Image (cartoon, helix red, strand yellow):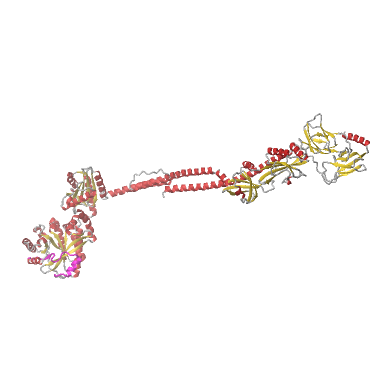
């Protein structure tokens, strides 16, 4: 639930509860009030009714008194008494007139003892006795009045003595006034309550008169009204009535008056109030709802705005203008957010500086360069080109290893500074990592590429001075051009790198990417990056191919061949990854691994009692490694292996690439006591003069001459002459590619010393080689025998 | 004047017949003298003499209160008050009504031919009450404030002494007795007297029947 919803809900529910409570209270208090008011009204009505009845009775009595003194009436009565036999018509007519004048129901004249003389009543006829004799006191004749129930009627009767004159009682005048429905209606109007005259007992009432025409008399008659004084309630036709019951004064019977008011009718007066309240509440609820909505919005809008702002901050937009005008906690929070926003912005500036800067040279880093390149690509107009130049120092790793990383770093800084000086407007420079620098030229046309490469290679013209040592660096520049060589930043960079490697391979200062280079480039690039990991991660293993001492037909030694079993690509041929290792500078590490493993294996064989010469191959780059000889010496010493047990094979071409450099290194190795062997002899166009100066002990005739030895006379000549030449120079001759017994026999005839090839075995992994040794048909050289090894010829001989 | 006239008459009668007189003292049952009582002796003489009497209206009262007359007497009703009166009687002995206008020069007269009690009332003034006792004898007298009176009568004719007074109401009371021979009589009533029937004249307003009461 949102804050807004909560606030809204809380306010509305609270208000609703208050209103319902208020309505209930209002209803209850109006009900109570109405009840008490009605009770008061009923008491008042009773007083009014009593008063009015009294007044009426007094007025009627006074009227009767007056009539009783009427001289004409006296005369009529006197006439009747004087002559009783006469009909009473005259008196009756007079009485009728009086009754009519005074609105009496009837009027009678009786003798002093109650015998009716004349009258207007249909029920009480002359000659009958008055039924209310107790009113007539002849001794002390006085006016008396009373309410009586006569038949079904309520009568107010007045008995007035007729004197002629007082105290001469001539008779009685009896006047009856009926309290009929009309009279009760008048009482009801005056008192403000409904009036019913009852007699009888609870449950058996008789309703004698009422102002209510529609009064359910039967239902009222059967009511069990309480006897107690005071106001009570009862239901009449399902409607609640508030009522008061009181006896009537001066009555001989159970005559009583019931005053009622309908509570429903009273409450109906409050209905407009209730409607008004309800509508006021509805409006209030509506207004409160709007108000709560407004408050909720004033609270929640800054919050949701802040949420939006925080989201924008989270997405990296720190320029969000924050609303800090809000007061209270929300404003405080907003201000804190502003502070946080600024803090984040500052930190991110630092981070992005670090993220996009190379900390060493303070040039742009790879990320920045890629970003710039991407931006340039998106903004590049059609038809224009963008060039990526990748400059990589040659042999920087060796230099780093030799002089130390600090020196390497200094060198890189100097190079960076020079490149920055050379940087032309509109072009971008970055250090991608290691000794790799990149240049972005946008826009660029194909014709500008080579001049650009030359321009920046000028940074290398002057030698660099590090720790007082002056050195000249070489670098290869790989070039890729958008849109010819790639559409994306990634492909452009990758292709520039491919071109750079091509240039290195070709020993060319710069190379332009060509699509056909790319066939294996991906795998090769991957392998290059993984090779170092492979050396350390145990993906490399050493295979062994046995060598045979031809004359003795005994096992002479093994050549160690490195194999790379890639976890994904499987077996990778050495002629594929070793050149790669040479290009990337990883070959030295590879060679060192081979040395360590081979020496350890040699030590293992010695412990088995086998004297096997262990041969390893080294690269031309190893010859440039100044610590190489020391490393071999340390390994030999560590595993307690005599140097003469190790043969170091080096290709003819490697030696010939830089004979001077090779000479020094080989000399060192020779002095160490390690046997040296020239591999692939016959393919490198080496001059005998150079060969003669090398401190080598062995020549390996390339298998291309051996394979067709029997069928090709030229090969036979070459092999024979090589053997003779070698022997003349006191070198042992190894023939590679020996696959048949016949070739072995021929080599034996020619005086070749050692044979190697599938006749013995193909290169075998350590376990297979161990089992091969067990089943070996050849003699195994014991560790104690020195074998056929000869002392190497000292250099210069 | 009346007394002297009567005395003269009695003297005349006495001279004609066996004249006798009777001294009477009337006492109530408490022994107090009772005034205004009428005493008469019957039977009277066969021949009656025409006579006159006066029933005056003074201060809204009949004066005298009780007027005994012999049958055939003409009573005049003067009006001494400055207001009108409407004198009436519904008594069987004499029914009449007289409208007495104020201070008329000639008072209206009424002859009473039947013996009996004539109760006088005023239709205007309810409280006015008077009696004219019409007797069939000339031998009647009224007690004075001492309760004393003297009757002159013809002893040969009159045998019975009668009494009447508005307050004598006891039915056991002997209303007549034989005329004593010695000429004096002290008549003490045995029954209690009822109160004076004359209503009081209202003071300021007409008398209300009752007070207001529930």
Number of numbered discs visible in the structure rendering: 0
Q: Does residue A746 lie above or below A140 as drawn?
A: below
Between residue B147 and residue A80, name the one nearer to us: A80
Residue A387 appears in the rendering: yes
The furthest residue to the top: B105
Q: Position of residue A689 (x, y in %)?
A: 8, 58
**Left or right relative to A442: residue A214:** right
Give residue A787's quadrant in the image: bottom left
Q: Does residue B201 lie above or below A306 as drawn?
A: above
Whether residue A774 appears in magenta in the rendering, the answer is yes
Between residue A116 and residue A560, name the one nearer to us: A116
Q: Position of residue A13 (x, y in %)?
A: 47, 48
Whether residue A564 appears in magenta in the rendering, the answer is no
Q: Position of residue A295 (x, y in %)?
A: 44, 44
The residue range painted magenta reads A750-778
Residue A472 appears in the rendering: no
**Left or right relative to A795: residue B176:** right
**Left or right relative to A448: residue A270:** right
Q: Position of residue A152 (x, y in %)?
A: 66, 46
């Amino acid at each position: 639930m949102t804050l807004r919803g909560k606030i809204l809900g809380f306010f509305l529910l609270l208000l609703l509860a208050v209103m319902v409570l208020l309505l209930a209270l209002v209803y209850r208090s109006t009900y109570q009030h109405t009840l008490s008011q009605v009770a008061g009204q009923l008491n008042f009505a009773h007083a009014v009714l009593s008063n009015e009845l009294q007044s009426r009775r007094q007025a009627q009595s006074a009227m009767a008194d007056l009539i009783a003194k009427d001289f004409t009436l006296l005369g009529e009565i006197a006439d009747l008494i004087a002559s009783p036999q006469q009909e009473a018509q005259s008196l009756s007519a007079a009485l009728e007139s009086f009754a009519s004048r005074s609105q009496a129901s009837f009027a009678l004249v009786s003798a002093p003892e109650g015998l009716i003389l004349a009258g207007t009543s249909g029920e009480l006829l002359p000659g009958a006795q008055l039924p209310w004799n107790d009113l007539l006191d002849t001794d002390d004749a006085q006016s008396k009045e009373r309410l009586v129930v006569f038949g079904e009627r309520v009568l107010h009767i007045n008995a007035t003595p007729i004197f002629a004159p007082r105290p001469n009682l001539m008779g009685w005048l009896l006047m009856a006034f009926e309290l009929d429905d009309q009279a009760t209606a008048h009482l009801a109007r005056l008192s403000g309550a409904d009036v019913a005259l009852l007699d009888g007992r609870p449950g058996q009432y008789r309703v004698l008169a009422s102002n209510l025409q529609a009064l359910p008399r039967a239902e009222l008659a059967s009511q069990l009204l309480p006897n107690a004084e005071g106001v009570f309630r009862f239901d009449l036709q399902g409607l609640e009535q508030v009522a008061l019951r009181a006896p009537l004064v001066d009555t001989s019977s159970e005559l009583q008056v019931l005053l009622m008011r309908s509570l429903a009718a009273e409450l109906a007066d409050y209905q407009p109030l209730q409607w008004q309240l309800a509508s006021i509440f509805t409006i209030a609820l509506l207004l409160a709802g709007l108000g709560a909505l407004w408050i909720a919005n004033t609270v929640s809008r800054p919050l949701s705005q802040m949420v939006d702002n925080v989201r924008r901050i989270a997405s990296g937009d720190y320029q969000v203008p924050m609303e800090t005008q809000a007061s209270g906690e929300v404003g405080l929070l907003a201000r804190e957010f502003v502070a946080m926003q600024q803090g984040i912005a500052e930190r991110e500036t630092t981070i992005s500086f670090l993220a996009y800067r190379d900390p060493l040279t303070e040039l742009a880093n790879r990320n920045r360069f890629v970003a710039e390149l991407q931006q340039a690509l998106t903004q590049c107009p059609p038809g224009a080109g963008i060039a990526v130049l990748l400059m990589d120092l040659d042999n920087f790793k060796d230099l780093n290893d030799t002089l130390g990383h600090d020196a390497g770093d200094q060198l890189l800084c100097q190079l960076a500074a020079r490149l920055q000086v050379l940087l032309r407007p509109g072009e971008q420079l970055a250090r991608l990592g290691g000794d790799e620098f990149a240049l972005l030229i946008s826009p660029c046309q194909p014709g500008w590429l080579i001049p650009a490469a030359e321009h920046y290679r000028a940074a290398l013209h002057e030698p660099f001075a590090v720790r007082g040592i002056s050195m000249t660096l070489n670098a290869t520049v790989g070039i890729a051009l958008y849109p010819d060589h790639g559409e994306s930043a990634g492909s452009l960079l990758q292709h520039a790198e491919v071109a750079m490697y091509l240039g290195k391979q070709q020993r060319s200062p710069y190379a332009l990417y060509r699509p056909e280079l790319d066939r294996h480039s991906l795998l090769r690039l991957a392998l290059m990056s993984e090779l170092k990991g492979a050396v350390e991660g145990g993906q490399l293993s050493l295979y062994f191919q046995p060598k045979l001492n031809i004359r003795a037909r005994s096992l002479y030694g093994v050549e160690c061949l490195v194999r790379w079993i890639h976890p994904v690509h499987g077996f990778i041929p050495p002629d594929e990854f070793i050149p790669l290792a040479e290009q990337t500078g990883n070959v030295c590490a590879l060679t060192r691994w081979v040395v360590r493993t081979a020496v350890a294996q040699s030590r293992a064989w010695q412990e088995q009692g086998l004297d096997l010469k262990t041969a390893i191959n080294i690269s031309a780059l190893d010859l440039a490694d100044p610590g190489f000889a020391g490393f071999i010496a340390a390994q030999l010493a560590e595993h307690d292996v005599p140097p003469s047990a190790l043969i170091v094979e080096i290709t003819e071409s490697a030696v010939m690439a830089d004979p001077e450099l090779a000479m020094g290194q080989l000399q060192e190795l020779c002095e160490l006591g390690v046997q040296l062997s020239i591999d692939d002899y016959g393919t490198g166009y080496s001059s005998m003069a150079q060969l003669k100066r090398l401190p080598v002990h062995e020549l390996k005739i390339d298998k291309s001459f051996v394979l067709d030895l029997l069928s090709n006379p030229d090969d036979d000549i070459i092999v024979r002459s090589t053997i003779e030449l070698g022997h003349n120079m006191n070198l042992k001759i190894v023939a590679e590619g020996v696959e048949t017994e016949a070739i072995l026999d021929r080599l034996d005839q020619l005086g070749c010393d050692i044979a190697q090839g599938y006749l013995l075995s193909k290169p075998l992994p350590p376990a297979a080689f161990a089992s091969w040794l067990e089943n070996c048909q050849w003699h195994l050289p014991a560790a104690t025998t020195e074998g056929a090894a000869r002392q190497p010829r000292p250099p210069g001989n | 004047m009346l007394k002297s006239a009567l005395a003269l008459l009695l003297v005349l009668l006495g001279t004609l017949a066996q004249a006798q007189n009777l001294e009477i003292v009337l006492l109530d049952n408490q022994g107090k003298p009772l005034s205004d009582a009428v005493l008469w002796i019957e039977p009277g003489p066969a021949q009656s003499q025409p006579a006159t009497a006066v029933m005056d209206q003074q201060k809204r009262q009949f004066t005298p209160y009780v007027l005994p007359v012999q049958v055939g007497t003409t009573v005049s009703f003067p009006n001494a008050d400055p207001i009108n009166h409407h004198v009436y009687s519904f008594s069987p002995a004499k029914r009449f009504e007289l409208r007495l206008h104020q201070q008329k020069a000639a008072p209206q007269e009424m002859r009473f031919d039947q013996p009996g009690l004539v109760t006088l009332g005023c239709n205007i003034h309810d409280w006015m009450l008077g009696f004219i006792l019409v007797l069939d004898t000339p031998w009647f007298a009224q007690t004075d404030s001492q309760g004393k009176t003297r009757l002159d009568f013809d002893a040969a004719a009159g045998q019975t002494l009668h009494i009447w007074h508005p307050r004598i109401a006891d039915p056991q009371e002997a209303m007549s007795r034989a005329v004593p021979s010695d000429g004096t009589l002290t008549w003490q009533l045995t029954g209690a007297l009822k109160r004076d029937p004359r209503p009081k004249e209202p003071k300021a307003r007409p008398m209300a029947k009752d007070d207001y009461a529930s």
